[in-house]
């Protein structure tokens, strides 16, 4: 199982706001910043959020991130059909001396 | 434009070896840490290894320690992953990714399209 814990699935209807959680520990999320990646089917991951809540240029402001203690979350507002994808959280783990990922959350737009 | 292009994947027998390459362009390669991340069929992302930009410090996941070696040739703007003693569970798409910092562990902001490694007899 993954070091970071995400729900395996999430869903929402167009226009809704959905959140995806990511739970870790003191050696990873509490100690380091969190990144979020979007992976469309058959494609490489794309950076969505870095440094807990920063968006790279080109990422719509419908996507936002937050962190508190040993948990982080990704929020998507104004859900669109093209948001249907897999989402992963990731951060550095000071005990493992490496990157750790969540198991991924498959978002379905109903 | 910042680009990463992996190559070197293929079909290899258990116990065999393979060397992956990742050609970088569009940025000062030596100034950034680089990583390999893999994804087994139908599974999630899993970090494999990282190397810092300037001093070349290396880090490995326990699952590949002692079998895989990450390296970089800053004169050729190329990242490598030498994979030895390959196992069926190493079957995956292997992505290279660039970090935003030289020391790494901060943000993998650019990813290649990946190269597929299949370990099977």
Image: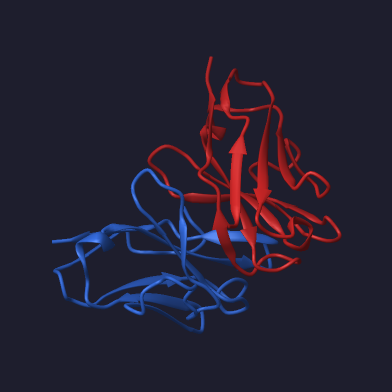
The figure's colour scheme reads: by chain
Question: Where, by quadrant of the figure, is residue B17 drawn?
Answer: top right
Residue A69 position in % (x across, y down): 51, 84
Residue B57 vs B93, above or below: the answer is: below
Residue A83, horizontal then vertical, whole percent: 27, 63
* Whole-percent x, y for residue A72 in the image: 45, 77
Q: Quadrant of residue A11?
A: bottom left
Q: Residue at x 71, y 29 (%)?
A: B84
Q: Colour of chain A?
A: blue
Can residue B61 be seen from the camera position used here?
A: no
Q: Residue at x 60, y 67 (%)?
A: B107
Residue lying furthest bottom in this view?
A68
Quick one: quadrant of the C terminus of chain A?
bottom left
* Residue located 76% across and 39% down the image: B66
Q: What's the residue at 60%, 17% (across, down)?
A: B13
Chain B is which colour? red
């Amino acid at each position: 199982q993954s070091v970071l814990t995400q729900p395996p699935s999430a869903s929402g209807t167009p226009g809704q706001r959905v959140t995806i959680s990511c739970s870790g520990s003191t050696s990873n999320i509490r100690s380091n910043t969190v990144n979020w990646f979007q992976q469309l089917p058959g494609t490489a991951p794309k950076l969505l959020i870095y440094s807990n809540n920063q968006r790279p240029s080109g990422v719509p402001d419908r996507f936002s991130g937050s962190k508190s203690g040993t948990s982080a979350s990704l929020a998507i507002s104004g859900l669109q059909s093209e948001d249907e994808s897999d989402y992963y959280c990731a951060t550095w783990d000071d005990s493992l001396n490496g990157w750790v990922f969540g198991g991924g959350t498959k978002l379905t737009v109903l | 434009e910042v680009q990463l292009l992996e190559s070197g994947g293929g079909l290899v027998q258990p116990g065999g070896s393979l060397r992956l390459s990742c050609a970088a362009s569009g940025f000062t390669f030596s100034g950034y840490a680089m990583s390999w991340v893999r994804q087994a069929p139908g599974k999630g992302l899993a970090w494999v290894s990282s190397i810092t930009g300037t001093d070349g410090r290396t880090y490995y996941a326990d699952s590949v320690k002692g079998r895989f070696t990450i390296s970089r040739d800053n004169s050729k703007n190329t990242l490598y992953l030498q994979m030895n003693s390959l196992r069926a569970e190493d079957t995956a798409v292997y992505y290279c990714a660039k970090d935003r910092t030289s020391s790494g562990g901060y943000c993998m902001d650019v990813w290649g399209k990946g190269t597929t490694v299949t370990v099977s007899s």
